Image: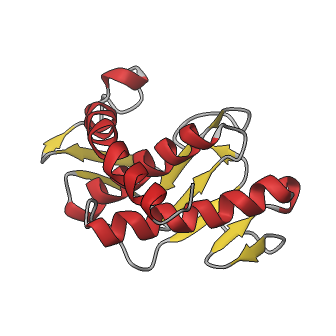
Amino acid sequence: MIRKTDIKIGDVYVARSVYNSLSRDYAKLLSEVVLSIKTLELIKFYNDMTYRIGPCYYPLGQSKDYTTLGIYHFLEKSLEISPRQKRYTFILNIIHELIHAEQHYTGQYKLEVAADGYVTGWWENVNITDKILEWEYYDRPWEINAIAKEIELVTPIYKNLIKREVI
């Protein structure tokens, strides 16, 4: 989520805590990956999404100490990605999180948060509320779907980035 102290580079926000030459390069790379995906029409997602590079904290029932390499915040329509990874993994995680954005955009994966913080979830119109936090990461159907699709999409996206001399 965007913070007042973030530094904006193009259409990407960078957390002040990780602002350096690598994060500046990664901000440009993130924009280029999004552009490739839109140009190739590989993933459908919101046009008004925000993008941020910085520490990523997993929100659903996890402690503040639990970090991840990338996360899609469905309520804010924002993608956060950590700069603490190699370039290839960085690109792969952008693709992965944008697939989650597509899952929400198309209604394949739906989450609703009540005023009291209770989360209700559906995967392909099946209520999965009781299983959301019980499933191990690689057993979650939305993760299985995202991993399969990212493997399918990484090659055309990478080729597009090479063709455009981004990498």
In-image side of 25 versus 120 (left or right): right
Say which of 153 and 123 sits in front: 153
> Relative to 154, does residue 98 appear above or below in the rendering?
below
> Relative to 50, does residue 81 appear above or below in the rendering?
above
Say which of 41 and 75 sits in front: 41
In-image side of 14 versus 103 (left or right): right
Does residue 28 show up? Answer: yes
State the image coordinates of residue 49 (x, y, percent, origin top left).
47, 72
What colouring method underlies this structural image?
secondary structure
In-image side of 164 versus 67 (left or right): left
Q: Look at 58% across and 44% down and name the residue there.
A: 90
> Relative to 10, does residue 132 appear above or below in the rendering?
above
Q: Quadrant of residue 17?
A: bottom right
**Number of dots carrying numbers:** 0
Q: Quadrant of the image for the N terminus?
A: bottom right
Q: Quadrant of residue 68?
A: top right
State the image coordinates of residue 81 (x, y, percent, origin top left).
61, 51
State the image coordinates of residue 113 (x, y, percent, origin top left).
41, 56
Does residue 116 show up? Answer: no
Say which of 127 and 79 sits in front: 79
Q: Look at 27% across and 65% down and name the residue there.
A: 44
Q: Look at 22% across and 45% down and name the residue there.
A: 122
Q: Quadrant of residue 51?
A: bottom right
Q: Quadrant of the image for the C terminus?
A: bottom right
